[in-house]
Amino acid sequence: HSVRMVLYEKGLDYDLFPTVQDTKPTWLVEHYEGKLPALRHRKECYVESDVIMQYLDYFFPKPEMTASRALKGKTNEAVDGFFPAVAQYLKHTPDGDDDDVELKFNVESALERLEDHLSAVEGDFLCGDQFTLQDCAMAPKLYHMKTGIQAFKNGSIDVKAKFPNVNRYMDKVFGRSSFIDALYPEDVIVWGWGNARK
C-alpha cells in the first residue's frame, strides 16, 4: 500500500502482480527470500517497503517526498514502535483479558506520542506541509489499526474522541487520491488479521 502510494504521488506507471506464498515467482523466492513487496526496475529488484520508497524518491525526484533530516528524525521518534504495538494488540486472543488490556494501553501510548507530534507540527502531515514518504508509510498502518480494532476489538479505542489530531490526520491522508487508489478492501485486511489471530 505504501509503495503504491509513492508510485501514484509521482505519477509513475507500473504493473501490479498480486501474489501469495504459493504463487511467488521462483526468482523472488530464490534470490530475495520471497520477500514482499518487491519492485523490479531495470533488471534490478528491491524488496521491503522503506527501501523501495527511498529508491523511488531518489530516482524519480519529482515531487520530492523526503523530509529534512531534522523533521524526519522527529517524525521517526513519534512513530517508532507504533505498528508493532498495533500488531500485538490485534493478534492477541482472548480479547479482554489482562494481557489484552495492557496491549491496548501500548497502542494508546503510541497514539498519544503521535498526537503530541501532530500538535507540535505546523501543517497537515507528519513533517509539516509536505506530504512525505513517512506519510505513505504511516497511512496504511493507521488504516490497519482502524479496521482491525473495529473488526476484532469492538471499536475499543475511540480515536476521534481521544486523539483529535490523529483523527484529523487520518481524515486528511485517507482522503488523498494516492491512498484511495492503493487501498485494499476492508475485508482483505480483516481476512489477513483473522489469519494472524489463529
Image (spheres, rainbow, N blue to C red):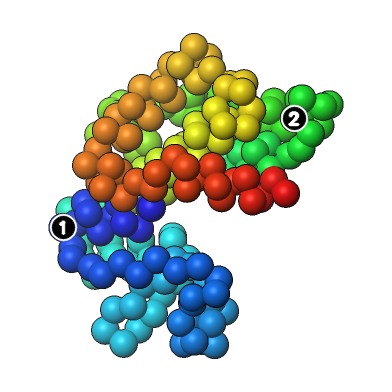
- SS category of the residue bearing label 1: loop
Looking at the image, which residue is at 22% across and 42% down? 177
Q: Quadrant of residue 50?
A: bottom left
Left or right relative to 56: residue 29: right
Q: Quadrant of residue 180?
A: top left
Looking at the image, which residue is at 72% across and 49% down? 198
Looking at the image, which residue is at 38% across and 52% down? 2
| Image mark for residue 11 | 1
**Looking at the picture, how far across and down is residue 94, in whole percent?**
79, 34
Viewer can see residue 131: no
**Looking at the picture, how far across and down is residue 13, in whole percent?**
18, 65
At label 2, the amino acid type is Asp
**Looking at the picture, how far across and down is residue 37, in whole percent?**
44, 66
**Looking at the picture, how far across and down is residue 144, in whole percent?**
50, 40
Q: Are marks 1 and 2 in contact (CB under 8 Å)?
A: no
- Comparing 81 with 143, the one in front is 143
Q: In the displayed orientation, state which residue is furthest to the top.
A: 161
Query: Is 98 placed above or below 79 here?
Result: above
- Comparing 132 with 90, the one in front is 90
At label 1, the amino acid type is Gly
Viewer can see residue 143: yes
Which residue matches tag 2? 95
